[in-house]
Image (cartoon, grey):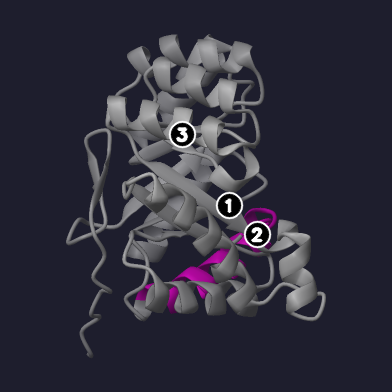
Amino acid sequence: MEKIIRRKSRQIMVGKVAVGGDAPISVQSMTNTPTSDVKATVEQIQRQERVGCDITRCSCPDEASARALKEITKAVDIPVVADIHFDYRIALEAIDAGVDKVRINPGNIGSEERVKMVVDKCKEKNIPIRIGVNGGSLEKDLLEKYNGKPTAKAMVESAKRHVDILEKLNFYDYAISLKASNLDLCISAYEEAAKTFNCPLHLGITEAGTEFSGTIKSSIGLGILLREGIGDTLRVSLSDEPIKEIKVAKEILK
């Protein structure tokens, strides 16, 4: 059997978990409890830990969620990522609460000054950023440039815009994901990114679906990329109990 040769990427640390370089491919999941409910979220993360999850992510839509992360991170053993969308203040609060990484797109949080505040805080706490590009929410000008629909090149160009903002601030501690619900688009975007960037790539198929259809879709998409040596960490996204995501991911990696 032909040996899989993994793409060389630079390594980042998410808490105690190495991502990229020659580190094993880590399995991620996400909580689906309200993050502000500390007890329910901690219990769910502990269940994820027991089935072999390496890194988990918590949605952080408001300041109450960001504040709750302080207790959550102290009560669990695996690294916790805060999922931030547009509000830089919530990002700052989550970083202060002790998260191990933030998922935020620097181009979406406003002025350069705001981005710099988040980047400086990440440098201070020594935590990485994940840039998350989604085929379903690309910038309007990029869609126009590529004939009104998301393409692999458009997704990589979007990622590059966010990367440029970080690198201009001398921040290189980042990973990228390029998720789409269309398998061909998703695979092509990751292949294009693998040639363009040397940072770790976080694999995932967005809106993969229910346990049955989502497992099949993720197995095909992630399986193809992994066989090409692409991918440093992955999450199987199912509209189901997170424990099932982890079990499917483990099975794919086997």
- Local packing at callout 1 (Cα closer than 10 Å; few below 14, some 14-19, many 20+) is many
Q: How crowded is mark 3: few (under 14 residues within 10 Å), some or many (20 or more)?
A: some
Disc marking residue 208: 2
**How far apart in space, not on screen, are marks 2 and 1 (Cα)?**
6 Å
Q: Where is residue 33 in the image (x, y as percent from the top left)?
A: 62, 24
Task: Label 3, secondary structure: give it.
Answer: helix
**Left or right relative to 32: residue 30:** left
**Between disc 1 and disc 3, whose residue precedes?**
3
The disc labelled 1 sits on which kind of residue?
Ser
What percent of the width, then of the height, locates residue 124? 29, 25
Q: Nearest the camera: 29 or 173?
A: 173
Up the image or down, 236 lies above or below 155; here it is above
Outermost residue, bottom direction?
A: 1
SS label for mark 2: loop
Q: Are marks 2 and 1 in contact (CB under 8 Å)?
A: yes
Q: Residue under circle 1?
A: 237
* Viewer-nearest of discs 2 and 3: 3
* Disc 1/disc 3 C-alpha distance (Å): 31 Å
Range of magenta residues: 206-226
Which residue type carries mark 3?
Lys
**Front residue of this view, candidates 211 and 188:** 188
Quadrant of the snapshot with the N terminus: bottom left
